[in-house]
Image: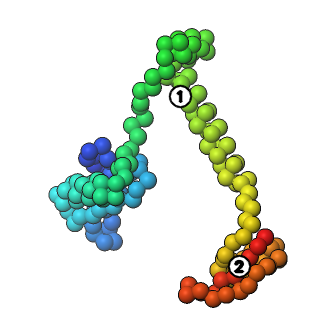
């Protein structure tokens, strides 16, 4: 059994943990993990409100914006000419303007996300000179880096080797 609560734009799912005999809540639709619990239904809503207030205060103290759930709607100003062209294309395609914009946005977001993922996976780094912990030296050797130039020396943080590749 589960139910939901809402507070200040946040939504939480409430479930009963029979093993612990406690109600457990989890804020959904945001990346932050916000959990709360209570022993009775009368206590769960105040616990949720307190968890949200603590999250907002923590974000404020750290100088970051609170992540709020997306509603699925937003306004975009595109200019009259583009608006007219999009509306005409939607009519010709036999679909609503909303549907056309959703498809175009989804396509562009997917294209950019895939391009970013491809760029990240093919990015190459060339190191001319680095200082690494010995564990990294062993890992580099295992990866085929054999050339070692320079001297071996000890630092307070542990043994390090100076490499040039």
Measuring 44% from the left and 53% from the top, which residue is drawn there? 31
Q: Helix, strand, or loop for circle 1?
A: helix
Q: Is residue 132 left or right of residue 4?
A: right
Q: Position of residue 96 (x, y in %)?
A: 51, 18
Marked residue nearer the N-terminal end (2 or 1): 1
The quarter of the displayed image where residue 148 is located: bottom right
Q: Say whether residue 107 is visible.
A: yes
Disc 2 and disc 1 in contact, CB within 8 angstroms? no
Position of the C terminus, as image quadrant, is: bottom right
Q: Is residue 143 above or below residue 69?
A: below
Q: Position of residue 79 (x, y in %)?
A: 49, 17
Measuring 41% from the left and 48% from the top, which residue is drawn there? 29
* Marking on residue 162: 2
Measuring 38% from the left and 44% from the top, which residue is drawn there? 69
Measuring 32% from the left and 67% from the top, which residue is drawn there? 18
Q: Is residue 160 above or below residue 108?
A: below
Report the Cα–Cα distance between label 2 and label 1. 53 Å
Question: Where is mark 1, residue-wise?
Answer: 102
Q: Nearer the viewer, mark 2 or mark 1?
A: 2
Which residue is farthest left? 42
* Marking on residue 70: none
User: Quick one: 116 or 33, which is closer to the camera?
Assistant: 116
Circle 1 packing at 10 Å, graded few (<14), some (14-19), many (20+), is: few
Circle 2 packing at 10 Å, graded few (<14), some (14-19), many (20+), is: some
């Amino acid at each position: 059994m589960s139910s939901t609560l809402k507070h200040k734009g946040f939504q939480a799912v409430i479930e009963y943990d029979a093993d612990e005999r406690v109600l457990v809540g989890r804020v959904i639709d945001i990346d932050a993990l916000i959990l709360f619990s209570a022993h009775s239904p009368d206590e769960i809503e105040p616990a949720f409100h307190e968890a949200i207030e603590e999250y907002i205060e923590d974000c404020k103290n750290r100088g970051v914006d609170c992540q709020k759930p997306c509603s699925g709607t937003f306004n975009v100003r595109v200019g009259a000419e583009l608006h007219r062209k999009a509306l005409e294309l939607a009519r010709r395609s036999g679909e609503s303007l909303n549907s056309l914009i959703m498809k175009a946005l989804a396509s562009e977001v997917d294209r950019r996300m895939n391009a970013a993922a491809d760029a990240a996976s093919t990015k190459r780094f060339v190191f001319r000179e680095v200082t690494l912990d010995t564990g990294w030296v062993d890992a580099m050797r295992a990866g085929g880096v054999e050339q070692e130039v320079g001297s071996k020396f000890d630092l307070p943080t542990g043994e390090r080797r100076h490499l040039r590749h």
